[in-house]
Amino acid sequence: MTKVHVIDVESGNLQSLENALERLGYEVELIKDAEQAKVAFPKVEKLILPGVGNFGHFMDNVHARELAGPINEYIKSGKPLMGICVGLQALLAGSTESPNAKGLGLIDMTLSKFKEDDKAVPHIGWNDADPVGMDKGLYGIDSSKKFYFVHSYAAIVTDATAKALQGWDYAVAKYGDEQFIAALARDNVFLTQFHPEKSGQQGLGVINSFLKGEKYTDVGPQSTKPGLTRRVIACLDVRTNDDGDLVVTKGDQYDVREKGGVDSSGNPVRNLGKPVEVARRYYEQGADEVTFLNITSFRNSPLRDLPMLQVLKQTSKTVFVPLTIGGGIRDTVDPETNETVPALQVAQMYFRSGADKVSIGSDAVYAAEAYYRNGCKGDGTSPMETIHKAYGAQAVVVSVDPKRVYVQAPEDCPHHTFETQFPGPNGERFVWYQCTVKGGRETRDLGAYELVRAVEALGAGEILLNCIDKDGTNSGFDLELIRDIKSAVKIPVIASSGAGTPAHFTEVFTQTPTDAALGAGMFHREEYTVAQVKDALAKDGLVVRV
């Protein structure tokens, strides 16, 4: 079995790349510092430099491990190197994200942040990568395919970049009105801003083309419309049932037990399948992302034995789209050692097991309350702040669980309100959405609008917007809530709760500016497939990945 070497500076989800390489039939060996590089580089045939998150944090790790020199020497040797995401960025001169951090300088370009006036930032989703001035594909990249991007900073194409790109083959993508570098290739170096290991079969094809040295490839038939796609996300609520088995379940307004009798509290937990098998089914149906929401605390489990770590490890072996994990991403006392483990370290465990993003719920509410008490300032200790600093905003999702509260007039409430099209039981014309914690069991004196503004300031890169009133109703998304929350933030918003038919996805994408939409029960009960939702969206003229 041919061996591929991978630079590991502990930046994000390396597990998925290892799984992708093994799926393609390669053995993986990690290189973590200069000493290992000195031993390995003479025999290395193919080298991959992956990275996610903050440019400065990544480069600090590269330099701390004394890997900058060995990487440059390896490139000069003429042997193949592939850089992925921040691995591409690292070979540029620098980034406005971290002005004091220096890149390796192979290309004289500086990364800059996307403009936020016409789009959500980070850029998250499936987009084009079009080779420029070529009638062939570039290592399997061509306009017939979609690839998964997740980043806030990019090498923006301007008139001044032409000189820096001389001699390079490159592909571009467009986000809003900004065109940026999606991939670069020259001689033995191949770089992608997107994540091929998270881009499904087409992404695996790109990695395979690089490893086989197939630089110029045939272009496939055009199967999708150009542009950023509408993301369809499958969500799995995971918990232990009464027999102790880990199962996928789904609730009605957060009650996951079977209905029957006056009180469902004694009824069994709904069992809708095994998490790994269900996730693989949705991947095969075309889900753009898969989200696991852990709704069992596992308080007595040592952190290293948390069941969701194994779920992620097993899922990422066969599911090559982004994986998000929610539940338990907080400062935690490890029952094995009785020591407090910071939220950042808990998140790192999930990233190393196959997660691309972590979702934070109740602790985000507590952090937002502290943010407002502190005069709209963070103290640097919240999960959003610590994880953002190491891995970037795109790795941090905040899950919001609000419920609708009616008021007669805005002055009757200290929170942000808006006029609703659906008056309350006593004719109330205004509403606000009250935040909850602990799985919706406890309300807080904080509005969802205020929450999302606070967590955006604290470093969150995406909002997972649930709605307790809509959960399990199959009546469609809460469009008013989605519009209101989108008006509050610049970061992407995922619409959740209420989807019951493909038409509900068309409705939310055409009647709100949401960035993605999530389904659960309708998929679990096999009333509709992810593919059927995407077919409906495509028939209505929306851009989807097929």
Image (cartoon, rainbow, N blue to C red):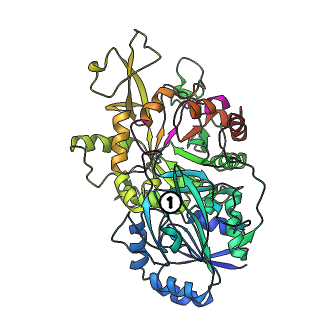
The one nearer the camera, 184 or 294, is: 184
The one nearer the camera, 59 or 499, is: 59
What percent of the width, then of the height, locates residue 54? Answer: 42, 63
State left or right for residue 378 relative to residue 509. left
What percent of the width, then of the height, locates residue 304? Answer: 48, 60
Q: Could you tell me which residue is drawn at 37 percent across and 51 percent down?
A: 459
Q: Could you tell me which residue is drawn at 59 percent across and 23 percent down?
A: 475
Residue furthest out toward the front: 159
For mark 1, give the secondary structure: helix
Q: Could you tell me which residue is drawn at 48 percent across and 30 percent down?
A: 467
The one nearer the camera, 365 or 273, is: 365
* Mark 1 neighbour density, 10 Å: few (under 14) some (14–19) many (20 or more): many
Secondary structure mostly seen in the magenta stretch:
loop
Quarter residue 6 falls in: bottom right
Residue that label 1 marks: 351
The three-letter code of the residue at mark 1 reads Phe
In the rendered image, is residue 67 in sight?
A: no
Q: What segment carries the magenta color?
A: 487-505
State left or right for residue 157 relative to residue 63. right
- Work out whether 371 lies above or below 332: above
